[in-house]
């Protein structure tokens, strides 16, 4: 009886402890579910922002292409205007030389004298000047009577071409400013994307390698971030930090996979084809790779070409080729539940 009473008390204590544990578990579960819903809402908001930014970037790139396409005809028009202006200035200088040689004054001075009204003229002095001019004209020979009209026409054309040149230069300056603005925004977006992918790469590398550290760095020597290269640094557990080129084949493959998943975390892709990426991995690394692949498969559809049994076991749908008869191949599919 005493033993049964003792067992009853112990059972009651275990029951109370189990009830308390159940209450705490339900409370934790409710908190996790609420946190998961908040995370899902944040994820949807981020996806919408990414889609809007992607659409905005596509529009900006289209504007850049249109502006660059429009810039070349404007440059050609500037060159043609420069040639026209040079020819007009040459014709004007020739007309001035001709007027000076035949009339003793420049073409503009001759036009001003012809347009001015003669008042209070000394006739004796005028007769002497006329006689002197006639003597000079006879010595010079035939005079081009259309010089003033030609000068006026060329002056008007010069003014028109100068105005066109100023308009084209203003349009070129506007296009250059637009290109500088787009390049500045592209650099800002590239820097934001690079820092986000860099942080993701560090985290995913530690998960896949069970430790170690990795980093992404812009190559030195280039001032423009859009033109410089990117160096991949990796340090698996037990090794020194260095370029990914110094790693073994399996470590290179895992580093590349980590970078791929880091990019997918920043900007998920709806579709991805992987061809023998697990060929250089051992069973432990293949297991970590497939676990992460299943995690990202919620947002991205993966097609994996592989001969690894562990990778095949993690797939939802298998496709294979068999040759039941010599020379006759047949496609076989298997849905894995």
Image (spheres, rainbow, N blue to C red):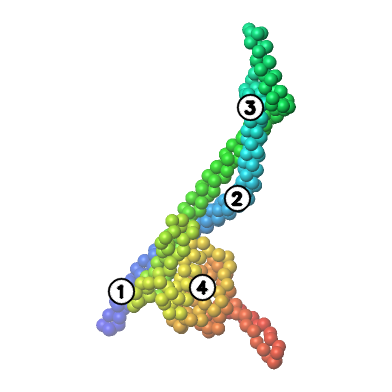
Q: Name the residue under label 4.
A: 294
Crowding at mark 4 (Cα within 10 Å: few <14, some 14-19, many 20+): some
Q: Name the residue under label 2.
A: 68
Horizontally, residue 160 falls left or right of residue 174, namely right
Residue nearest the viewer, comparing 92 with 208? 92
Q: Distance between the residues labelled 4 and 2?
A: 44 Å
Q: Mark 3 points at which residue?
A: 100
Crowding at mark 2 (Cα within 10 Å: few <14, some 14-19, many 20+): some
Residue nearest the viewer, comparing 141 with 32? 141
Horizontally, residue 146 falls left or right of residue 75, namely right
Crowding at mark 1 (Cα within 10 Å: few <14, some 14-19, many 20+): few
Q: Can you say which quadrant of the picture contains the N terminus?
A: bottom left
Q: Which of marks 1 and 4 is nearer the N terminus?
A: 1
Q: Earlier in the sequence, mark 4 or mark 2?
A: 2
Query: Looking at the image, is 245 positioned above or below residue 133?
Result: below
Q: Mark 1 points at which residue?
A: 13
**Residue furthest left in the image:** 2
């Amino acid at each position: 009886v005493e033993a049964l009473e003792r067992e009853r008390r112990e059972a009651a204590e275990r029951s109370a402890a189990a009830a308390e544990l159940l209450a705490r578990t339900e409370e934790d579960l409710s908190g996790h579910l609420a946190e998961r819903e908040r995370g899902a809402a944040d994820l949807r908001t981020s996806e919408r922002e990414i889609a809007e930014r992607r659409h905005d970037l596509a529009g900006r790139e289209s504007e850049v292409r249109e502006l660059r396409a429009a810039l070349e005809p404007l440059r050609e028009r500037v060159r043609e205007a420069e040639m026209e202006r040079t020819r007009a200035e040459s014709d004007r200088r020739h007309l001035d030389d001709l007027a000076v040689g035949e009339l003793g004054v420049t073409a503009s001075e001759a036009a001003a004298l012809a347009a001015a009204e003669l008042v209070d003229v000394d006739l004796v002095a005028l007769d002497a000047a006329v006689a002197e001019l006639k003597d000079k004209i006879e010595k010079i020979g035939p005079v081009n009577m259309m010089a003033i009209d030609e000068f006026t026409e060329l002056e008007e054309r010069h003014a028109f071409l100068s105005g066109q040149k100023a308009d084209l230069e203003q349009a070129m300056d506007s296009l250059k400013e637009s290109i500088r603005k787009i390049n500045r925004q592209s650099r800002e977006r590239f820097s934001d994307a690079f820092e986000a992918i860099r942080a993701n790469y560090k985290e995913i590398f530690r998960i896949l390698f069970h430790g170690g550290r990795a980093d992404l760095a812009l190559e030195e020597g280039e001032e423009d971030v859009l033109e410089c290269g990117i160096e991949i640094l990796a340090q698996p557990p037990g090794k020194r930090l260095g370029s990914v080129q110094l790693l073994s084949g399996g470590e290179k493959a895992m580093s590349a996979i980590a970078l791929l998943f880091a990019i997918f975390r920043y900007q998920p892709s709806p579709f991805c084809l992987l061809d023998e990426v697990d060929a250089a991995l051992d069973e432990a690394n293949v297991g970590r790779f497939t676990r992460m692949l299943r995690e990202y498969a919620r947002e991205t559809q993966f097609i994996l070409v592989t001969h690894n049994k562990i990778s095949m076991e993690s797939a939802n749908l298998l496709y294979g080729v068999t040759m039941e008869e010599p020379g006759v191949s047949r496609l076989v599919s298997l849905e894995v539940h």
